[in-house]
Amino acid sequence: MKAEQNELVTRIGPGTPCGAVLRQYWQPVALVDEFDPQLDPRMAQRPVKAVRVLGQDLVLFRDQQGRWGLLDRDCPHRGADLSFGRHEGDGLRCPFHGWKFDAAGACLETPAEPTGSKLCERVRQRSYPVVEQSGILFGWFGEPGTEPPPFPQFDCFVAPSTHTFAFKGLWNANWLQAFEVGIDPAHPSFLHRFLNDAALVPVDDTHTYWYSVFTSFAGPVDKAAMRNQRTQFISLPDYIPKAGRHNRWGFNADEQRTTTYLGMGEEDINVHDQWAVESMGPIQDRTREHLGTSDKVIMANRRMLLKAIETVQAGGTAPGVADAALAPQMQGPDTVDGIAPAGEWPTWWQERVRHRRDGAPWIAKAPTAAETA
């Protein structure tokens, strides 16, 4: 890949071509669990969090009516940090001069202004739509005045909360190398003993949160047990992995020689991918790569991304779930973990999908996309 192409596909901040593409999709901004006082006692008195998504500094809060507010973090008065604002039930009040904003960004009060001032009526703080799905809060960062696309109806989002569990973790690396490790077809045979898929959202150019939604097609999930399994390796409330470059990702040479292929344990699959992604550096230099036949998916994805950037720059719509016309097709499971028998994979995966969906107590008994294709 040429250096200018690598720059194009990795930079995602406001005003960047790739950032414009990603802003046409719903992006995860936080877990609902992050507002649970049992997991973060600070939330009992003040359900407010500073978040950073796509290189933007934001404040996320829940008001006394249960509405979610996602606002630009800099106060529109003098730019002070609204994540330190006073939570007053119906909105956030900036401690600098007392300007107050509700969950939709409307200015409620400007107390230092003279009586009769209309300034408050002319001021709004930029707010972003928020949707709660399967324990994740998603925000949409499209241009002001444009409508967000319908939310995709994948099984993980249609399933009731009793049958889903969401979690996340922070990686110190660019979004694209984090994404590419997830679609790399050759690496699981070496790096992992089993497969696991996750969605990713860029925090900024050099940090990425992965999000996973676990969906049960049988009985309800035990959220506490699933969370406890993962907090052995990831610290709450900021969801930062305990392993990293600072401790060589827990690498043990003796383990690599005698027990596992990588030498970083068997219990936490995420640290395997974390090492692969972070060890490339904050932003991978793709000009030094030598891609092979097994990298066809990687190459195809990069071509699609470059094409999407070109389309959006020309005023078009990014592909997939960003396209409202395709929303009816965005349903059902799109992957199956497993190794198909040689020569039987075209029918094997469809049978696995059908069997899993037929056994789910909560799913509407409708044909899958594969069955109607």
Image (cartoon, rainbow, N blue to C red):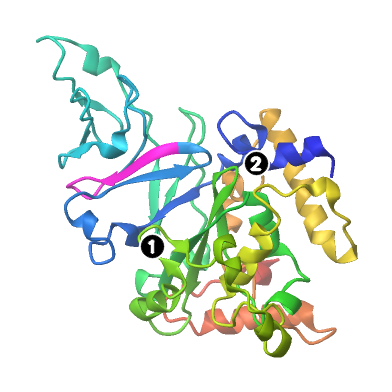
Inter-mark Cα distance, 1 to 2: 26 Å
Residue 93 x/y as whole percent: 20, 32
According to the picture, the residue beneath numbered tag 2 turns out to be 318
In the rendered view, would you say 322 is above or below 146? Answer: below
Q: Tell me the amino acid under the disc marked 2.
A: Ala
**What residue appears at the point 58 percent right and 58 percent down from the top-left corner?**
330
Q: Is residue 103 visible?
A: no
**What residue appears at the point 70 percent right and 75 percent down from the top-left corner?**
191
Q: Earlier in the sequence, mark 1 or mark 2?
A: 1
**What residue appears at the point 52 percent right and 44 percent down from the top-left corner?**
149
Does 165 sit left or right of 76 as displayed?
A: right
According to the picture, the residue beneath numbered tag 1 turns out to be 135
Q: Are there few (<14), some (14-19), or many (20+) residues within 10 Å of tag 2? A: many
Q: Do tag 1 and tag 2 residues touch (Cβ < 8 Å)?
A: no
Does 337 sit left or right of 79 as displayed?
A: right
Q: Is residue 168 visible?
A: yes
Does 164 sit left or right of 198 as displayed?
A: left
Q: Tell me the amino acid under the disc marked 1.
A: Gly
Of residues 72 and 146, the one drawn nearer to the viewer in this rendering: 72
In the rendered image, residue 296 lying in the magenta stretch gets the answer no
In the rendered view, would you say 126 is above or below 166? Answer: above
In the rendered image, residue 58 lying in the magenta stretch gets the answer yes
Task: Tell me where the magenta segment starts and ends, as one range.
Answer: 57-67
Residue 313: quarter of image: top right
**What residue appears at the point 52 percent right and 38 percent down from the top-left corner?**
55
